[in-house]
Image (spheres, rainbow, N blue to C red):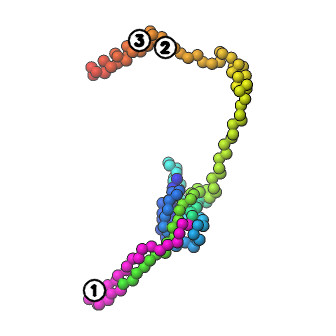
Amino acid sequence: MYAVIKTGGKQYRVAKDDVIQVERLQADVGGSIDLAEVLMIGDGDNTTIGAPLVADAKVVAEVVEQARGEKILVFKKKRRKNHRRLNGHRQELTVLRITDILPDGKPAAKKRTAKAKPETPGAAAVQTEAEGPESAPEPVQETAATASESSDKKSTDKKAADKE
C-alpha cells in the first residue's frame, strides 16, 4: 500500500517504513505526527484519488530527527554593472519514518484468531465409527489394461506431432 501526501508545498509518494525528508515540521524527536493531506492511496489494483484530498485518510509518521540540509550557494550577477551577490542557504528539515497508512483514518483492527479446542482422542474415533466405511471414497486402482491403453495414446499423439 502506498500514498501520495502533500507537505511543505511538495508531494511525496510514501509506503510503510519509508524514511523521507520534508520541510521543517513542529514536532518533537521520537514523537508521532499525522499527515492529513493525502492526495491518493493505492493498494494493488485499487486506487483512490482525492478531489483534491481523500476524505478521512491520513498517514502516521514518527519523527526521527530535526536536521538541516546541505548548504547551497545563490550567486546573482548583472553583467557590465559590477554587481555580484553571493548568498548561502541551509534548509531546515524533518526526517520522518512512515509507520502507517490509514485509508479511513482509523487504525486497522487486529484480527483475532479463534483458538481450536483440544479434541480428545476418543471423540475422533466416535466420529469415524458413526460415519461408517461406506462414506469414505475408495481409491481408484489402475489396471494393467488401462495403463497400456493410455501409454499407446501418448505414443500415437507424439508420432502425429512429429509428422506435422
Q: Residue at x 34, y 18 (%)?
A: 157
CA gap between label 2 and label 3 equals 10 Å
What whole-number distance in Å separates the C-alpha atoms at marks 1 and 3? Answer: 96 Å
Q: What is the x, y in percent for residue 133?
A: 66, 15
Question: Does any portion of residue 12 appear in the rendered image?
Answer: yes
Name the image quarter holding the C terminus. Answer: top left
| Amino acid type of the residue tagged 3 in the rendering | Ser
Q: Is residue 8 visible?
A: no
Which element is circle 1 on?
A: loop
Of the pair 67 and 49, the residue shown nearer to us: 67
Residue 81 placement, left or right of 69: left
**Where is 68 relative to 142, above or below?**
below
Identify the residue at horizontal 49%, vertical 72% (top origin): 67
Considering only order in the chain, which callout, 3 or 1, is on the residue closer to the N terminus? 1
Classify 10 Å Cα crowding around label 3: few (below 14), some (14-19), many (20 and above): few
Instruction: Answer few, some or many: residues within 10 Å of disc 1's Cα (few below 14, many 20 plus, some between 14 and 19).
Output: few
- Using a 10 Å C-alpha cutoff, classify the residue at mark 2 as few (fewer than 14 neighbours), some (14 to 19) or many (20 or more): few
State which tag comes first along the sequence, 1 or 2. 1
Which residue is the site of mark 3? 148
Residue at the (56%, 59%) spot, across then down:
99
Image vertical order of residue 120 relative to residue 40, above or below: above
**What predominant SS class does the magenta segment belong to?**
strand
Q: Nearer the viewer, mark 1 or mark 3?
A: 3
Residue 145: where, in percent of width, then height? 44, 9
User: In terms of image quadrants, where is residue 85?
Assistant: bottom left
Mark sitting on residue 16 = none
Left/right of residue 123 with respect to residue 141 in the rendered view: right
Name the amino acid type tagged 1: Arg
Q: Residue at label 1?
A: 79
Q: Which residues are magenta?
A: 63-85
Q: Is residue 62 above or below residue 113?
A: below
Question: What residue sits right under mark 2 in the picture?
Answer: 142
